[in-house]
Amino acid sequence: MTEYNVDNQMRTRVLNEALPYIQQYSGKIVVVKYGGAAMIDDELKQAVMSDIVLLSVCGVKIVLVHGGGPEINSVLNKMGIEPKFSPTYGMRCTDNDTMDVVQMVLCGKVNKDLVRLIFDHGGRAIGLSGLDSGLLQATQLAEELGYVGEVNKIKPRPIYTALESGYIPVIATVATGASGESYNINADIAAAQIAAKIKAANLILMTDIKGVLRDKNDESTLIHTIRASEVALLKEQGVIGGGMIPKVDCCLNAVRDGVGKANIIDGRIPHSILLELLTDKGTGTMMLSDFQKKDDEYKVVKTEYKIER
């Protein structure tokens, strides 16, 4: 068999494997939380944007949620403001000056850079933040953290409007408070809450780890699928621990609140989003509810956003 024929057969197998997944996700919402190495390394960044545009062209309704910790730290350092983190919460302490920088960097530079990158790859995107039309509304999480909030209300109309107009909404995780103040929101948590609110078919959290491992020192022990009911036991056994706990909890809350699936994937792998969504094996850990909805319950409904004013 010639090399040409082998290459053609390989391409055909790839396309045949992807086709049923494209059909499954077409017309449905997938929320992607973008962060980690894939947000810093230029090659990985280009691969993520390419994946997102390809899925969008195939009819998948992508909602991109992002943070921007490294960019924020860089600007703070340039301004002579020392980044501070709470050992109690493992989160950034955000005073008034820091919050100004967070809002400027996330809603401005990072958000618009991502919109431009999607455009450069042939896609259509529009930048949003939690401040737009009260999309994300929050209260203070803890006095120690300053302007770090927890979301208590989501008004998803801007997301639906963007999707129905053929745009990929790119959302910066800054929220508004009751008195007009702004809050910094953890991007994983915001993505999970948004996914639940808009009844997404899938939530994808991009990280710098392979997924949930039975042995944290051995990547070959990756757990490919976890049911919601198994999480408590895996925590007791120490399989889920440390920094993996909040990510798993985000996935757990999402599937319990109606999201079809939640995936923790390794953003250090080029095209990891496509590999997770469009191949049989996937790349990371997938969490499922113990009770699955039918696929057609996750389709975008044009009138659904009218419920939220």
Image (tube, rainbow, N blue to C red):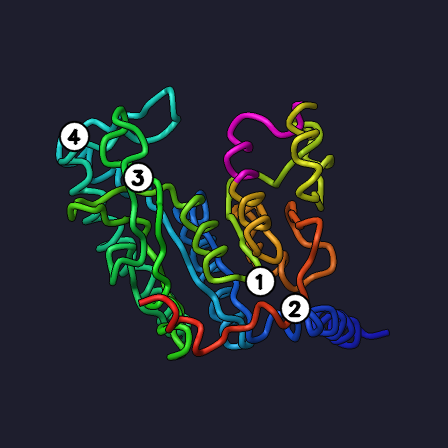
Rendered image: mark on residue 81: 4
Which residue of the protein is positioned furthest toward the right in this rendering? 1
Identify the residue at horizontal 29%, vertical 64% (top origin). Answer: 127
The amino acid on which the numbered mark 4 sits, given as a three-letter code, is Ile
Give the Cα distance between marks 1 and 3.
Answer: 26 Å
Identify the residue at horizontal 49%, vertical 59% (top origin). Answer: 31
Which one is in front in this view, the residue at disc 2 or the one at disc 4?
A: 2
Mark closest to the chain's N terminus, 2 or 1: 1
Rendered image: mark on residue 149: 3
Is disc 1 in contact with disc 3, using a CB cutoff of under 8 Å? no
Mark closest to the chain's N terminus, 2 or 4: 4
Mark closest to the chain's N terminus, 1 or 3: 3
Compared to residue 24, the image places residue 103 above or below, namely above
Using the rendered view, name the quadrant where residue 224 is placed.
top right
Asked whether, in this view, residue 180 is left or right of residue 111, the answer is left
Residue 238 in picture, x, y percent from top left: 65, 23
Residue 24 in picture, x, y percent from top left: 66, 71
Is disc 2 in contact with disc 4, using a CB cutoff of under 8 Å? no
Is disc 3 in contact with disc 4, using a CB cutoff of under 8 Å? no
The amino acid on which the numbered mark 3 sits, given as a three-letter code, is Gly
Mark closest to the chain's N terminus, 2 or 3: 3
Residue tagged by mark 1? Answer: 201
Q: Is residue 245 magenta?
A: yes
The amino acid on which the numbered mark 2 sits, given as a three-letter code, is Asp
Give the Cα distance between marks 2 and 4.
Answer: 48 Å
- Quarter of the image with the N terminus in it: bottom right
* Magenta range: 238-249
Identify the residue at horizontal 57%, vertical 39% (top origin). Answer: 248
- Crowding around mark 2 (Cα neighbors within 10 Å: few <14, some 14 to 19, many 20+) is few
Q: Determine the secondary structure under disc 3.
A: strand
Residue 8 in picture, x, y percent from top left: 74, 76
Mark closest to the chain's N terminus, 3 or 4: 4
